[in-house]
Structures are given as structure tokens and as C-alpha cells.
Image (cartoon, rainbow, N blue to C red):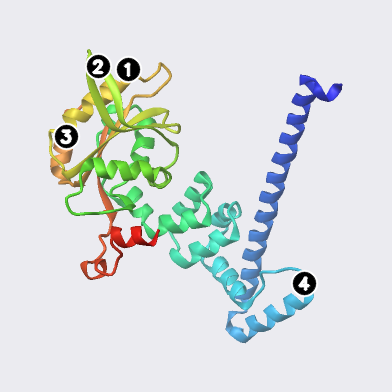
Amino acid sequence: MLVNTNDYKDALERIVDIVERARVRATQSANAELVRMYWNIGAELNAHAEWGNKYIDSLSRDIRTAFPQIKGFSARSLKYMAKFNREVGIELCSNCCTIPWGHVMLLLDKTEPGERRKWYVEQTIENGWSRAVLDHQIDLKLYERQVLSGKVSNFTRTLPAPDSELAQQALKDPYIFNFITAKQGQQEHDIEEQMVTNVTNLLLELGTGFAFMGQQYHLMVGGEDFYIDLLFYNTKLRCYVVIELKNDKFKPEFTGQLSFYVAAVDGELAGEHDNPTIGLLLCKEKNDTVAEYSLKDVNAPIGVSEYRLGDVLPEEYIKYLPTPEDLQARI
């Protein structure tokens, strides 16, 4: 029968794809019109701001009477619309039309008008962040860490444009691994293990395009064995990224080891269509001047950043936690 032929299956797949893409476009179009409507309602509200809150309350009640089947016109929502129009110009409003209204309200609550808010809108669009992820990134001050921080790297000298700019934009300082609890006497291997266990959170913190390739990744070079702490591939940068983790303050000799790993990955793993491998050295702390001098004559593309772990539970609370024996007794 026709339904069993490959031609029929191919036709069905194409039609399903057409329908799915049309549904996505329809949803995006509906969202854009909704957000644009809220901005225009906000303009009308601001035109009569001197009428006060009772005006908002009356409007909320009358609008819901006129459109009982439509939600989103509470007095609180109308105040968000007024703030949206008051704080967001028409150009940024066009960008906001591509993200859900819940994201817009979050940005109105947690950011001030200006470049920081604009950057979070652009990153939400580019990365497809959910509201929860956007909230997480704002709380962890991603803009400050990725845009405002004085990042230490040699990317502009060792990578061609625009790759150098993209790599520098992707770099953060510090990296926040708050899903890993800091412990006294913690070793680098322990931190690596927790990173891999929480790889979803790790990839979220590293940023867009990172794919995990392995921990203690084995390389055979000249008949000798070497092990890379963490190896990733970044689909946006189209290159391998070698991450070396140091549970210590930055030391100049760290760059030599990482340079070797970067060169080895270029020689042993990277293909002809891959961009040059990038190295990322993560240290507990660093002196920026020392790090900059250390990278001055290094030809491998390397960035140096600090990292932060989650806070240690205060000593006074630890005594209230169950011991392993208590937990075992409850099983």
C-alpha cells in the first residue's frame, strides 16, 4: 500500500514539519501582538497618570467586564503595562515582542532601563531562555560577569576576527558554580566530579553552544598518556574548549600545561574545518596583572578566570543535620 512507501513517509514528514513551523510562527505572532498591545495600553494609561490608582482600578474592572473571557487585565497587570511603556522605548519594545510577557515583567522588576536590560532581552532571544533561566542569570549577575568584568585573555592576539570577539564575549569572570558546595580540603578532582554530576547546570553556566566531551579526557601524545580535566566542543565558536581547573591561586606555570593541551587537541582531535582550540584556566583567585603578563608571549588562545562555589553551610546549622548513621537507620 501507499502508506508503506518511502515517498509517502517523506511527504508526511514534510507536511508535519510545515504544520509545526506554522504553529510556531502563529504563536510568535500572537505573542508579539499581545506584548505590543500591552505597550499601547500602557501609553494610554500614562497619558492619564494624574488620575491616580482609582482610575487603574476602575479600568481593570470595566475591561474585565467587557472581555470576561480574557485574562491579564488585573490592576497589577495594568500597572506593569504602564511601567513597560514608560521605561521601554519603541525600539526595545520591538525586541520585547519576541519574548513572553512573563519575561518582560521579570525584566521590569529586576533591571533598570538601559544597556543592562537591553542585553538581557537580546540574550533571552538568542539563547531561548525560559523565565526561570532568565531569573537565574540576573540573580547571578551574568551581565556584570560577562560584559563589565575585566576579562583576562590573549584572544585578540591569537585568534582571527571575528572569532576573537566571539570568544571574548563568551568568557565570564568569575564563573559561578553555586550547584557545588565548597568544603574544607576539597580537591580539584572532587570539584570536577560534582561538575560532571551536575552537567546540565555546568553547561548553563558555561553558556551557549557548549557540548560536554569528557572528564579526564585521555590523549596519547608521542606514546605518553595525558589527561585533560574537562573537554568541551562549542558549536557556536566551532572549536574544542579545554578547561583546566585549579583549586589554587593563579600561577604563571599553569599556562604552560594548558598551552600543551590546547596544541595537543589541535593536533590529535581537531578537524580541518574546526577553528583553533581555546583553553580556559579556572582558578580560585588570580592577580590580573600576573595573569596578563603570563599570557603575553603565549601563542595558544587562553582565557583566565576565577570561579566561585556555593556557600558552605554555617557551622551552627551543621549540628542539626542527620548523620549518615541516622539516614541509614531510616531506610
Q: Closer to us: mark 1 or mark 2? A: 2
Disc on res. 200: none
Compared with 200, 279 (above or below) is above
Residue corresponding to mark 2: 221
Q: Secondary structure at mark 4?
A: loop
Mark 4 touches mark 2? (CB < 8 Å): no
- Tell me which corner region of the image, top left, top right, bottom left or bottom right, holds residue 254: top left
Q: Residues within 10 Å of mark 3 (few under 14, many from 20)?
A: some
Q: Earlier in the sequence, mark 1 or mark 4?
A: 4
Q: Amino acid at mark 2?
A: Val
Q: Amino acid at mark 3?
A: Phe
Mark 1 to mark 2: distance in Å?
A: 8 Å
Q: Secondary structure at mark 2?
A: strand
Q: Amino acid at mark 1?
A: Glu
Residue 201, x across and y down, in percent: 41, 47
- Residue at x-position 65% and y-position 59%: 36
Residue 89 visible? The answer is: no
Q: Earlier in the sequence, mark 4 or mark 2?
A: 4
Residue closer to the observer: 64 or 254: 254
Q: Earlier in the sequence, mark 1 or mark 3?
A: 3
Residue corresponding to mark 3: 254
Disc on res. 268: 1
Residue 89, x across and y down, in percent: 54, 60
- Tell me which corner region of the image, top left, top right, bottom left or bottom right, holds residue 65: bottom right
